[in-house]
Amino acid sequence: MNCPSSSCCGVSPPVLANPRGEFAAGCSTRTTQKAHFFGSRPSSQIIYSPTSSHLSRRAVIALAGKQSWDIGRFAKTLFFFNGPPNPLKIVESIMSSITASAPTEAPKKAETSDLVLVTGATGGVGRRVVDVLRKKGVPVRVLVRNAEKARTMLGPDVDLIIGDVTKGDTLDPKYFKGIKKVINAVSVIVGPKEGDTPDRQKYSQGIKFFEPEIKGPSPEMVEYLGMQNLINAVKESVGLSEGKLLFGFKANLCGKFVWGALDDVVMGGVSESAFQIQPTGSETGEATGLFKGTVSTSNNGGFTSIRTKNFTVPEDLSAYDGVELRVKGDGRRYKLIIRTSYEWDTIGYTASFDTTKGEWQSVRIPFSSLIPVFRARTATDAPPFDASNITALQLMFSKFEYDGKLNPTFAEGQFELPFSSIKAYISEPITPRFIHVSSAGVTRPERPGLDLSKQPPAVRMNKELGSILTYKLKA
């Protein structure tokens, strides 16, 4: 609409939101104006006629048969998740909503990685491991101290990381992103006291005995402390068999995420929900989280949800196969939405799950089942789900499924969904993710009554070689 003068509306016409989630500008003259809803719903007529630039006591007026829209709760929701309002971002969001076109490309599936890391890859055992994996067509990355030596031995195109297990600060976890399995062939270097050839012919010939000694860092540094450094560097990439707890009370992780309500008030609705803590609500009488509220279809609404604020650092769950929720069902169908972007109004990777009334149950949602969804419609041009960059989680109870379909278990009124934990899981069968290649003789030095004269040199000379087998066993 056009404003005839600055005296009519001040610097700019105030923007009001009606109970249907639409926007209109105010002028002192009576005007009939179409207010456009940012979505597929047809526009509707609203009439307003404030006599000055001052808002009336009820800035939002219920249409016939509609409930008044709580613009204050709408503002609080935006502020909670986004901080102080940025006018430029609001305008950009509105314009993108108006001009967005329907996607046409087929959805892409998330890619999986079978990348194996081999440490100690330039040693005798490590080279053999790399060779076997390559012949099987398995992608390999190697951890070495000397890049030139590695390229000479393993080829100029070898995928490598430069690092030293004895120096934890050289093993940045970001170098290991995408690695699903590790074969550790790192070993302390043992060689003849009198020296050896560059390719260690004396050490590897296996016939003539040469008096050995430790070359370089001690067995304690390489075998024991080095193992700890390596595990700390790769544990987020390879994952833990028991899973990774994201939310729960037993591990005191209830405060890790900050939850807030995100209801249909953002589109003019009146549904309302909250996240609460029940001190004795779990199946064992301990504390549990609670998603509860009242859902209504008034004002074309029909959904409630709780969403975490964006994580300060994205969660890397690429080592896992999905997310498991421990919930007490009420017979309704809910949604889990996983966000991979810090943007407010963007695609969420979504899965619906059914619950059994009155029963505690574990609900597993494989990452492969997630659907990219934007405003209840499948986003067919969305990028693949990236489990290494999870920025927020959301639980939702909605009238809507996807692409116009309805939730068959939906009913207006009150609801409750207690949930005691959310964790990432690895699917069964769980195969080894970290394999350590060591000596078969590590237990021998501690055997009572052992005749050392009949043992191999490494066993006989364990102490002389810096307790090499003792630290291999500790590792």
Image (cartoon, rainbow, N blue to C red):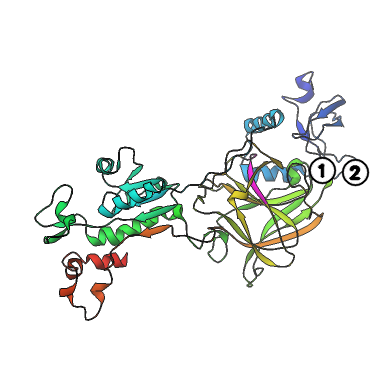
Marks 2 and 1: CB-CB under 8 Å? no
Residue 277: x and y in percent read 65, 62
Indicate left or right for 272 with 140 as reference.
right
Residue pictured at 75% horizontal, 56% vertical: 293
Q: Residue furthest right?
A: 64
Residue pictured at 67% horizontal, 68% vertical: 281
- For the residue pair 351 and 10, the one nearer the viewer reads as 351
Name the quadrant of the N terminus. top right
Callout 2 environment at 10 Å: few (<14), some (14 to 19), or many (20+)?
A: few
Q: As displayed, is residue 14 above or below residue 354?
A: above
Mark 2 secondary-structure assignment? loop
Q: As displayed, is residue 159 above or below residue 434?
A: above
* Residue carrying label 2: 65
Say the numbered circle drawn on residue 300.
1
What amino acid type should be assigned to the residue bearing mark 1?
Answer: Asn
**Magenta stretch encompasses residue 350:** yes
What span is in magenta?
344-351
> Which quarter of the figure has residue 469?
bottom left
Residue 243: x and y in percent read 52, 60
Q: Quote the CA–CA distance across marks 2 and 1.
A: 12 Å
Indicate left or right for 26 with 338 as reference.
right
Decide if residue 359 is in sight here.
yes
> Which quarter of the figure has residue 194?
bottom left
Mark 1 secondary-structure assignment? helix
Say the numbered circle drawn on residue 144.
none
